[in-house]
Image: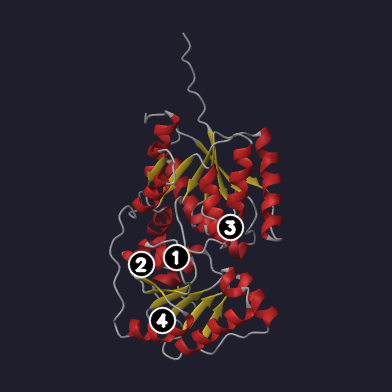
Amino acid sequence: RHRRASPMPPELHLVVAARPNLPKIAALWHALAEAPDLAAPVLLHTGQHHDAAMFGAHLADLGLSMPQIALGVAGGTHAELTGRTMIACESVWRSRRPALVVVAGDVDGTLAAALAASKLGLAVAHLEAGLRGGGAKMPEEINRRAVDAIADLFWAPDEASAARLVAEGHDPARVRAVGNTMIDSLLRSLPAARRRALPAGLVPRGYGVVTLHRPANVDDAPTLARLLNALGEAARALPFAWPMHPRTAARLAAFGLSVPGGVRVLPPLGYLDFLALLAAARLVATDSGGVQEEATVLDLPCLTLRCETERPVTLERGSNRLVAPAALAGSVAEVLAGQWPRAAPVPLWDGRAGARIVAHLRDVLGRPAP
């Protein structure tokens, strides 16, 4: 008698569009690598971020291979990028149909892939589901709400986000609070990051980090000018290092604005180099959601230059506070005086989110552990 061959595991397409997607997807990639019987992960890169600084260097840092599918869609308005990405995804998935499409976060490529997959009848899983901010017209908020409206599986970073999804009417069996895959990647990478040299002239705890890229902060000249003035005032007490997003650099040039003294501009950094910079900083001023999460786990004072956040757990348990530009210098002074709150551990942010997703997939796909 011939032994029947084991069925090939189904393909799962893991969609990455922009740089913030990579550490989220990397955690699931590595967890699936430890469960080869469950699924064959295929990395699909839409192209939203595509150069070495914003994408390529991060692959090696996160232990990822080059994407097996590269769509090469980049640039244009929100509508142009979303539409062209949908068309490219549809072209791939008409001939190569995965068992599940996994999208992460809230960028335009995430929404485009989710829409294209859903319209082709493919199951969609949303990694980092259930986040909600107060700015209903914010592009990222529109994207995350739209993806949650059409997804089939929901992997939430905390219990509150999972409860919100159930309250919105989603089947509890399809919602799972898995934890934060960004933190899986951070904890996995932190030892290697701490061995990285800081940029010349920077000493541990002797500087702050700043990151700014959201349209609400950088696409309006008066708003960006106010932020620059606030940074200049804060930098009198503590110098800042600013790894500058290409979008922000373009806006500075277009508006004829200059970076104030005491603020050192750095090029975009790879994942490990940025993590090294963050881990050795005295504080971070940012408008990034991911940096708020990383700062919470690092117990790093985080001054979020926004009027709301879709990550309230970083306010409730973390070292994050919402800070208006006019209050930035005063907040920096509080940090330097030791008057800033310390972070507490966040439930489920323990480096096991990828493993919890694999466990949920086994339940959903009916493939018990061998």
Q: Is residue 335 above or below residue 296?
A: below
- The reply to whether residue 359 is visible in this rendering is yes
Counting residues from the start of the chain, the first of labels 4 and 2 encountered is: 4
N-terminal of the two: label 2 or label 3? 3
Badge 1 marks a residue whose secondary structure is loop
Q: Which residue is mark 2?
A: 315
For the residues labelled 4 and 3, say whether their Cβ atoms are less than 8 Å apart: no
- Which amino acid type is shown beneath numbered disc 1? Thr
Check disc 4 and report the residue beneath it: 203
Mark 3 neighbour density, 10 Å: few (under 14) some (14–19) many (20 or more): many
Indicate the amino acid at tag 3. Answer: Ala
**Quarter occupied by residue 301:** bottom left
CA–CA distance between discs 4 and 3? 30 Å
Question: Which residue corresponds to mark 3?
Answer: 18
Q: Are marks 1 and 2 in contact (CB under 8 Å)?
A: yes
Where disc 4 sits, the SS reads: loop
Q: Amino acid at mark 2?
A: Leu
Q: Nearer the viewer, mark 4 or mark 1?
A: 1
Q: Camera-side residue: 29 or 151?
A: 151
Q: CA distance from mark 2 to mark 3?
A: 25 Å
Q: Which residue is drawn at the image coordinates 28% and 64% (left, top)?
A: 344
Q: How many marks?
A: 4
